[in-house]
Amino acid sequence: MPLRKNLKRVDAERSADPGAVRAAAITLLSRRDFAARELHEKLTSRGFEADSVTAVLCELTGEGLLDDERYAQNYVSFHARRKQGPVRIAAELRAHGLAPELIKAALASGPDWHALARSTRVAKFGPKPPGSWAEKARQARFLQYRGFSSDHIRTATGADPDLD
């Protein structure tokens, strides 16, 4: 059975009602945290007018219920615990519409990315360092897929050609 998204469209008379927009936004925020642009897109896709949505989101931001900085920090923390690297996390945050300075600050307050890359490599391939260049390349591709930069990968795999 195919899955369908259940988009609850609002009727024309409620589409500009700030109370209805606020109620829908609070309902969505009660389930999980959203970036402002992401929530704006979700509400407008349900049929709310963009001007009303923008005004309500400004109110929610002023009240502290909607905070892109908090969202970015929580996002980085959650995905780092899932052993994803900063390159991948930054790309996903850009896709959610966060400002580059918020992304940079959230990544800077994140974990030690070199240590995370090492622990991710050890969890997947074991504590023994890679013996051949082919194995180093395989492990490097895995870490690159997980979102680690080349510096993090070199640290994790010991793939520095000057040392070999």
Image (spheres, helix red, strand yellow):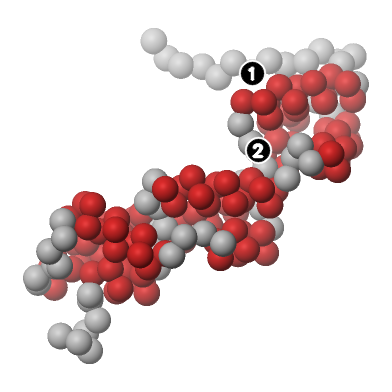
CA separation in Å, label 1 and label 2: 17 Å
* Nearer to us in this view, 107 or 55: 107
Is any atom of residue 57 visible in this view?
no
Q: Residue at x 42, y 14 (%)?
A: 2
Measuring from the top left, give residue 111's x and y in whole percent: 46, 60
Q: Is residue 45 above or below residue 34?
A: above
Disc nearer the start of the sequence (1/2)? 1
Q: Which mark is residue 17?
A: none
Q: Residue at x 43, y 65 (%)?
A: 112
Measuring from the top left, give residue 78's x and y in whole percent: 49, 45
The amino acid type, in three-letter code, at marker 1 is Leu
Q: Quadrant of the C terminus?
A: bottom left
- The local secondary structure at tag 1 comes to loop
In the rendered structure, the answer to whether residue 75 lies left or right of residue 149 reads: right
Question: Mark 2 highlights which residue?
Answer: 34
Residue, far left:
131
Is any atom of residue 42 visible in this view?
yes
- The local secondary structure at tag 2 comes to loop
Q: Residue at x 65, y 38 (%)?
A: 34
Measuring from the top left, give residue 45's x and y in whole percent: 70, 28
Measuring from the top left, give residue 63's x and y in whole percent: 84, 39
Residue, far bottom:
162
**Label 1 CA crowd tier, 10 Å (few <14, some 14–19, many 20+):** few
* Nearer to us in this view, 30 or 24: 30
**Label 2 CA crowd tier, 10 Å (few <14, some 14–19, many 20+):** many
Question: Mark 1 highlights which residue?
Answer: 7
Q: Residue at x 22, y 75 (%)?
A: 158
The amino acid type, in three-letter code, at marker 2 is Phe
Q: Quadrant of the N terminus?
A: top left
